[in-house]
Each structure stands twice: as structure tokens, then as C-alpha cells.
């Protein structure tokens, strides 16, 4: 009878644990659906999409019972420069209207432009020498150059390097005076966000069936606003540890994305990085109910996509003592996991990486835990530069949507989100960090 009671206790305890983890997955999906919805405008710097996202995260922290760490506020305000496209964005080739973010992208550094322009189509071989480049710019003084940027089979390494330099000059050089550049490519259209405005408009085109040699005219109506000091904010909160020690574990994720290209097209950013925020908030909720040994600080950064500017603002005016951080984990691209996870700085902090891999093998959670060396490719970087032990972890496999309009909540698989969440709980609770 006694053994039976213990067995039933274990059964119901395990059932409760599994139910709790399943609830975390439901919660994570709702977070991603919210942050990647049209209402949040791509979480960029048009229509205050970033501020809507920050307010949502702060509300979730407060609802979960986390404490603000900035003098009673969940926010840390700062400013950044940004080039934005808040109004009309329209491109026509030979009078035919192109579909924004499907057929073309406006380079994120482009200035405003409006008008009808003659187009001069050229091949890469037409800019493989300085003389040809200068002659082309002179010919196109009042026109747009349309470069068919598909490499020829006979291009050698040296020629490729020269052409790359000359494309950069066509984009940026003040010495070349012409109206603008159209770049035709068959590469995937991938956008970004930039903190500066360039001297001439650049349009990247990838329209199926288009023959760039047939293009004679371009009509453009692109509204642009450059803001040298856009007001944005990080969101920060904490759970106090049971040990009453001042040692701290820090969990981070950036919430910003690319915003909008015009008033109608937005970039949802479901995997990048609503999914990382979902992991952050899921762990915040969990530890609010299961207080950890050490203090845990949760940081949601703005400005990552535009140059790690949110984490830079935090490092410049830290809300916690950086020397007290035992370990930091930065989450990004957390929505797949078909091929496991990859751990940046794994080769640097090998003991912690071995612990993570050991826990994964022991509990058979993810397909694999891959190791990677240093890479300054997300918000962990500036902490690491200050001597803070840190990982940057992202999932692998699954969908290929990235920095495009197809990174949507409805197509994000969450393949291994639940076991990934479990692995991180075991990692933070190990007492070995």
C-alpha cells in the first residue's frame, strides 16, 4: 500500500511537470503570435513598433511578478540613429509595378527619391576595370544604372574582387555622379536596418522571369525619414535568488526587428527574434514561480539589428554590477531546433559547454548541442568584451525564413522549443555555473 502511494505520487508529480512544460509552449506560441502580428509593425522604428513591443514585454514581466531594476522602472531609455521608410514605397520597371519585399527591396541606407528615370542596363564585365567604371558613371549622369549582378562562369578570383570593389563604389562613392543603382540578383531578398543614410538610392531586384537587359525606365516614389536620435528602450527585470548572494545569472534576447518598408509592408520577425523573447519570458515566468539559487536578471534589448546598440547602451550605463555576473546566456532564433542548437563561445567556456552537452545527453532532449567559437554577432558580444562569461545560443534546422516577410508566426514550427526550454532550466539549476 505504501509503495502504491509513492508510485501514484510520482505519477501525478511527473504529470504536473509535463503539463507545466506544455503550458510554457502554449505561452511561447502566444508571445510569438503577438510580437510578430501586424499590430507591432515589425518591432522597428516606424509607427513606434519598438515601443509597443517594449510595453508588452514589461507588462509580461510585471504580471509574472518580476522586479524592475532601474529605479522602479522596467525600462532603460536610450537613443539611436536610424534610416526609416514610413510612407510610400513604389517601384515600377518599364511601367510595371513591382511587389515590395517580393520582387525587390530598397537598400536600408537609401535616401528618398521620386521621379521617372532612364535606365542603363550593364553586365558585371562592364565594371571590371576602373576606366569602365568611370566611363559608365559619366554616361549615366542623369540615369539609373541597372547592374545584372549574376557572375559569369569565366570570372576569376581577381576579377570578382575588383567587381566587388566597384559595386561598393557604385553604392557609396561621392566621386561617381549618377542618379541611382538597380542591382539585379537571383539571391534571396534579405533586408536589414541601418543607422545611416547613403548618398544615392539603391534598389535590389529579384523578380522571376525578368530580363534586366530589357529594362529601359524606372519610376520611383520612395519616402524616407532619417532620425539621428530616435528614442527607444531596453526592458529589464529580475527574480531574487534564494541564497541572498549578489551573484547573478543574466538571460538576454533582443526584441527589435526590421520594422516596415513603406506603410503597408512589415517584417514579422517571428523566429528573429520573437522566439528568443518567448524563451526569455517563458524562463522569467518559470523562475518567478521557482526561485533560483542566484539572482536572475532578464534583459530584452532594442537596437540589436541596427548594430547591437541596445546592449551597448546597457554596457555603457549598466543597471547591475557586471563583475557579479556568474554567467550570461543570450537567446536568438529559438523557434526551430530540428538539428539541435549551436553555442557561440562554447570553445571559450568549455566547462559550461560540456555541462550543457552532458545534461542534453543525460536527459535526451535535443538532437545535438554543437560548439562554436567566438562570434560578435549578437548582444552577448559586448558583455563578453567586458569579461562576462557568456553564451549565445540559437537553434538549427527547419525553416529558412530570415530577415524577410516570410518569417511568420504561423509557419514557425517550434520543433524543439519545449525540450530546449527544459535543457536551459536544468543548465541554470545545475549549481555548476
Image: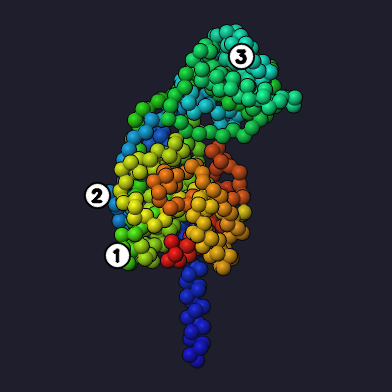
With 104 as the anchor, is 28 left or right in this view? Answer: left
In this rendering, is residue 409 above or below 261? below
Identify which residue is drawn at 48% across, 84% down. Answer: 6
Q: Residue furthest left?
A: 71
User: Who comes first in sequence, dot 3 or dot 2?
Assistant: 2
**x and y percentages locating residue 8 in the rendered image:** 50, 82
For discs 2 and 1, the disc positioned in front in the rendered view: 1
Q: How is the image coloured?
A: rainbow
Q: Which residue is mark 1?
A: 244
Residue 59: x %, y % from top left: 34, 51
Image spot of residue 414 (x, y percent): 55, 54
Compare marks 2 and 1 and give the one earlier in the sequence.
2
Provide the residue designation for mark 3.
130
- At horizontal 50% and vertical 60% (from top left) the residue drawn is 351
Query: Please, what secondary structure does the residue beneath circle 3 have?
Result: helix
Residue, x 61% and y 14% (percent of image)?
130
- State the residue in front, 388 or 234: 388
Q: Position of residue 213 (x, y in %)?
A: 69, 17
The answer to whether residue 31 is above or below residue 264 is below
Amino acid at each position: 500500500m505504501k509503495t502504491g502511494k509513492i508510485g501514484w505520487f510520482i505519477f501525478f508529480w511527473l504529470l504536473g511537470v509535463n503539463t507545466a512544460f506544455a503550458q510554457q509552449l502554449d505561452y511561447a506560441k502566444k508571445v510569438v503570435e503577438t510580437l510578430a502580428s501586424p499590430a507591432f509593425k515589425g518591432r522597428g522604428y516606424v509607427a513606434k513598433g519598438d515601443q509597443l513591443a517594449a510595453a508588452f514585454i514589461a507588462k509580461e514581466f510585471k504580471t509574472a511578478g518580476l522586479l524592475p531594476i532601474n529605479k522602479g522602472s522596467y525600462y532603460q531609455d536610450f537613443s539611436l540613429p536610424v534610416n526609416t521608410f514610413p510612407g510610400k514605397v513604389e517601384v515600377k520597371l518599364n511601367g510595371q509595378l513591382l511587389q515590395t519585399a517580393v520582387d525587390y527591396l530598397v537598400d536600408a541606407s537609401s535616401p528618398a527619391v521620386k521621379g521617372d528615370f532612364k535606365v542603363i542596363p550593364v553586365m558585371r564585365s562592364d565594371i571590371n576595370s576602373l576606366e569602365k567604371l568611370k566611363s559608365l558613371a559619366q554616361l549615366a549622369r542623369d540615369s539609373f544604372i541597372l547592374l545584372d549582378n549574376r557572375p559569369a562562369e569565366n570570372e576569376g578570383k581577381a576579377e570578382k574582387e575588383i567587381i566587388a570593389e566597384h559595386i561598393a563604389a557604385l553604392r557609396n562613392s561621392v566621386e561617381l555622379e549618377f542618379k541611382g543603382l538597380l542591382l539585379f540578383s537571383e539571391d534571396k531578398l534579405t533586408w536589414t536596418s541601418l543607422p545611416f543614410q547613403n548618398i544615392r538610392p539603391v534598389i535590389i531586384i529579384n523578380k522571376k522571369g525578368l530580363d534586366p537587359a530589357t529594362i529601359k525606365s524606372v519610376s520611383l516614389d520612395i519616402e524616407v525619414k532619417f532620425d539621428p536620435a530616435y528614442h527607444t528602450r531596453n526592458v529589464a527585470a529580475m527574480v531574487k535568488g534564494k541564497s541572498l548572494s549578489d551573484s547573478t545569472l543574466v538571460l538576454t534576447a533582443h526584441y527589435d526587428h526590421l520594422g516596415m518598408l513603406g506603410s503597408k509592408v512589415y517584417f514579422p520577425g517571428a523566429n528573429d527574434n520573437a522566439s528568443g523573447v518567448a524563451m526569455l519570458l517563458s524562463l522569467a515566468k518559470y523562475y518567478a514561480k521557482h526561485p533560483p539559487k542566484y539572482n536572475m536578471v532578464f534583459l530584452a534589448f532594442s537596437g540589436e539589428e541596427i548594430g547591437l546598440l541596445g546592449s551597448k547602451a546597457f554596457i555603457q550605463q549598466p543597471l547591475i554590477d557586471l563583475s557579479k555576473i556568474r554567467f550570461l546566456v543570450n537567446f536568438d532564433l529559438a523557434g526551430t531546433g530540428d538539428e539541435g542548437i549551436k553555442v557561440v563561445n562554447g570553445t571559450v567556456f568549455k566547462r559550461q559547454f560540456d555541462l550543457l552537452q552532458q545534461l542534453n545527453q543525460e536527459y535526451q532532449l535535443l538532437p545535438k548541442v554543437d560548439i562554436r567559437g567566438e562570434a560578435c554577432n549578437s548582444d552577448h558580444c559586448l558583455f563578453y568584451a567586458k569579461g562576462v562569461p557568456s553564451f549565445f545560443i540559437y537553434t538549427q534546422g527547419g525553416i529558412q525564413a530570415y530577415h524577410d516577410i516570410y518569417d511568420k508566426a504561423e509557419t514557425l514550427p517550434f520543433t524543439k522549443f519545449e525540450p530546449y526550454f527544459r535543457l536551459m532550466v536544468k543548465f541554470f539549476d545545475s549549481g555548476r555555473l
